Amino acid sequence: MAAGLPSSNLKSTYVEGQSYKMPLIVVTNLFFIWAFVTNLNDVLIPYLKKACNLSDFQSSLVQFSFFIAYFIMSIPSASIIKRVGYKRAMLIGLLCMLAGALLFIPAAITGIYFVFLAALFILASGVTLLQVAANPYVTILGKPETASARLNLTQAFNSLGATVGPWIGGTLILSALTDEEFNLLSAVEKLAVQEEQSSMVILTYVGLAAVILLISAIIYFSKLPEIGAEEEEVVADSSNDKTTIFTHKHLLLGVLSIFLYVGAEVAIGSFIIRLAGDPAIGGLTELEGKNFVSYYMFFAMVGRFAGSYFLSKISPSKVVGFNALVAVALLFVGVFTSGSVALYSIVLIGLCNSIMFPTIFTLAIKDLGSFAKQGSSYLVMAIVGGAFVPPLMGYVSGLQGIQKAFLVPVACYLFIAYYGFKGSKVTSLPEHEGSKKDIANAESMATEIPL
């Protein structure tokens, strides 16, 4: 697994006087489109719940099918990049996304849930390849000393895609009827509503396919700088060391924290529309509820800017612990109150989420020495948490109701709080040659993976 991701330590292609503005604009489109696609899942869940007559648990398999691709496809993606190069890998990723988007046509026509899940997995496989290829590529599109600024710029467009995706998708796909109004319709009227929604799903994903095809054409005809061969990193041979990567407790706890964090973030977003439709909360239509998913992602985007200030003033581990405890408090308000207070409490968790992934990542790889790159790969694989926590939340919803289901992410954030305040403390400090270089590369990866 250590070799699962390409190193961010790439030979710079920067040439004084050459403009990299256009290549950067071209590649930045990828960050927008994969965030847009990923967050359409939050809209698909309520649609598929009705269209395929699913339980909350069954509908949450949307996220399982999507996020399991991160675990399965990361290593093959790295192999593809090594074989064909970064530009062609991006094109392959986009074509894979195109195939997944077009598979939504037979899925919507037949109404077969498995076909939807297959389409989502193929779509997510393309997204995974894009992330593995595009993130390090951005670092070479300009002066080495301004790489962080370029990454922050692409992160902004990623957040924008995450915010507008649910809003646009929800406007096109979701019903303007409440659950109660829908249940009062005759069988013929219900079928008519579902057929109309299915046609809008087809329209949405055909439109998405057209955008993906356009971006593919732009990248194909663009003169993107050729990336240099990856520099071989010379690190000390640790085969004779008394320590292994598994002796670094703060890394292992960090992997679990990333797993739980991504799972909690995805699970909350997956069920916000469902919560907004609950009569005790708002009784909103799915069309109205989709706005709150966008608010959730918007607050995460705002929090990234605020978080950068606080992280420069306060210990990152304390910021993680504090944010996790605030998230727990907001979840309790959401579970044990009602109306708009409960709904907005859940939405505000986006602020708490904003800084968690990169900060936990950085804490987890601290002082790993030559194990830094291997540890980074484990942390990236932990994104698969997004595949497992939402189904658990859906299962609890089926037993206890949608509000009580929000106690599931409470457990996730409590562990993250423990990690921030105690578990992130380094307990093993081995010295290895090249450790500073390895840690710098690993920390760069944390800022390059937008969630």
Image: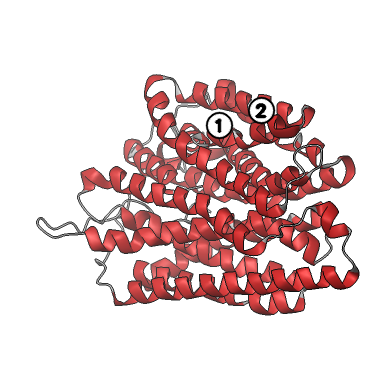
Horizontal side of residue 347 vs 448, given as left or right: right
Q: Which mark is residue 352?
A: 1
Horizontal side of residue 210 vs 418, given as left or right: left
Which of the 4 image quarters holds residue 114? bottom right
Which element is circle 2 on?
helix
Query: On screen, 446 above or below 193?
Result: above
| Rendered location of residue 273, percent (x, y) | 70, 48
Does the CB distance between marks 1 and 2 fall below 8 Å?
A: yes
| Rendered location of residue 272, percent (x, y) | 69, 45
Which element is circle 1 on?
helix
Identify residue for label 2: 330
**Mark 2 residue type:** Leu
Q: Earlier in the sequence, mark 1 or mark 2?
A: 2
| Rendered location of residue 423, percent (x, y) | 58, 25
Horizontal side of residue 304 vs 342, given as left or right: left
**Mark 1 residue type:** Cys
Query: On screen, 350 above or below 19?
Result: above
